[in-house]
Amino acid sequence: MSKIPSDSVGLVTPQTAHFDTPLTLACGRTLPSYDLVYETYGELNAERSNAVLVCHALSGHHHAAGYHHEDDRKPGWWEAHIGPGKSIDTNRFFVVSLNNLGGCHGSTGPCSTDPETGRVWGPDFPMMTVTDWVHSQARLADRLGIERFAAVAGGSLGGMQVLQWTLAYPERIANALIIAATPKLSAQNIAFNEVARQAIRSDPEYYGGRYHEHDAIPRRGLKLARMIGHITYLSEDSMGYKFGRNLREDDFHFGYDVEFQVESYLRYQGDTFSTSFDANSYLLMTKVLDYFDPADIHGGDLATALAPANCPFLVVSFSSDWRFPPSRSEELVDALIQADKSVSYARIESPHGHDAFLLPEPRYQSVFSAFMGRIARDLSLKEAH
């Protein structure tokens, strides 16, 4: 890369926070100690009131913005929205982004060593929930001296974490941004996740989750899982626009090798993912998605479940997102209204499907920036007094 863009946070270095205090998990097990890898962008003000927590989606990680080295060609996954002058303006906010427990980008997860056995955790790593993640994030906030976040923001699975923050720590979150998310998965979504899990678990190289001990990687299963997932992240229109029925060459070959450009794209995505993401982490992350349903303990009454929340919400959906369609966001919005909460909602017209929450859609940016701008102005008024 010849030059880092002026609206980027620039070069960033991941940090690691180690915790020796055991974390009791929803599954009934306890994680005796753990590491959380995170990055920060911007400066924390003297009052420690301008912090924004960014929560990642299924295959995300701590690297949300900026670059890791001068020749880095791939910025953080939310580069379009974090940086000087962007929606989450790092001239105004101090941003914290971490890799959740169970991930495979430095935080303690299935690839880590179990301190009790000295072996890689593998399939023995405890099952996680969104609630567990939020508790660990709150501990990281304690470590950083942040008593209350000016905002917690996230898309997809990240949005579920934001919602859980408003319920578990209502006094520690001033604003919630829930983007392209849902208060619970539909049966269809759980079904997609199960097909992806079976693709991994049926790979001969999976070895019951102990592939590390066999010096193996279930690449074929991971590749299929990613191909399945990627189809659901795009819309029919965006796939048609990108690929149509275009062939890689001029004519049919009448065989099973790659002939259509969309086949080539999906195989490339699958191959790349299979060498960069851990299979056990993928299984765990999809189950975290499946389990999330804060209304369950209230007999399915979402409005009752939302009673603890006391901050303003921004909920955003995208018209062509069929993985988490606008109707699921509107279900959340209706429940927030019923629970007498402050909520703003925007349904963004976009051809890009679920992945639209990662992209610089003009109206999305406008809505996102306006909400964050109001938060920044409120902070400025408090500081002035």
Image: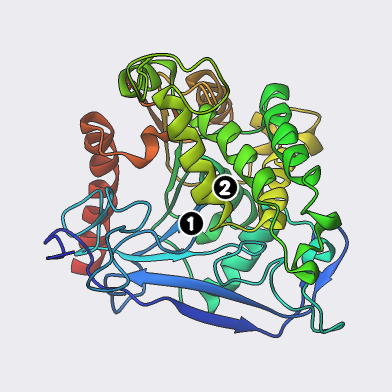
Mark 2 secondary-structure assignment: loop
Q: Nearer the viewer, mark 2 or mark 1?
A: 2
Residue 14 appears in the rendering: yes
Residue at the location (60% across, 83% down)?
A: 18
**What amino acid is labelled 1 in the image?**
Ile
Residue 142: x and y in percent read 54, 76
Q: Is residue 49 above or below residue 132?
A: below
Q: Which residue is mark 2?
A: 58
Picture coordinates of residue 270 (x, y %)?
Answer: 54, 42
**Residue 385 visible in the snapshot:** no
Q: Could you tell me which quadrant the C terminus lies in? A: bottom left
Label 1: element kind: loop
Which residue corresponds to mark 1?
173
Name the residue located 74 percent from the left edge and 78 percent from the top edge. 113
The mark that comes first in sequence, 2 or 1, is 2
Residue 143 percent across, percent down from the top left:
53, 80
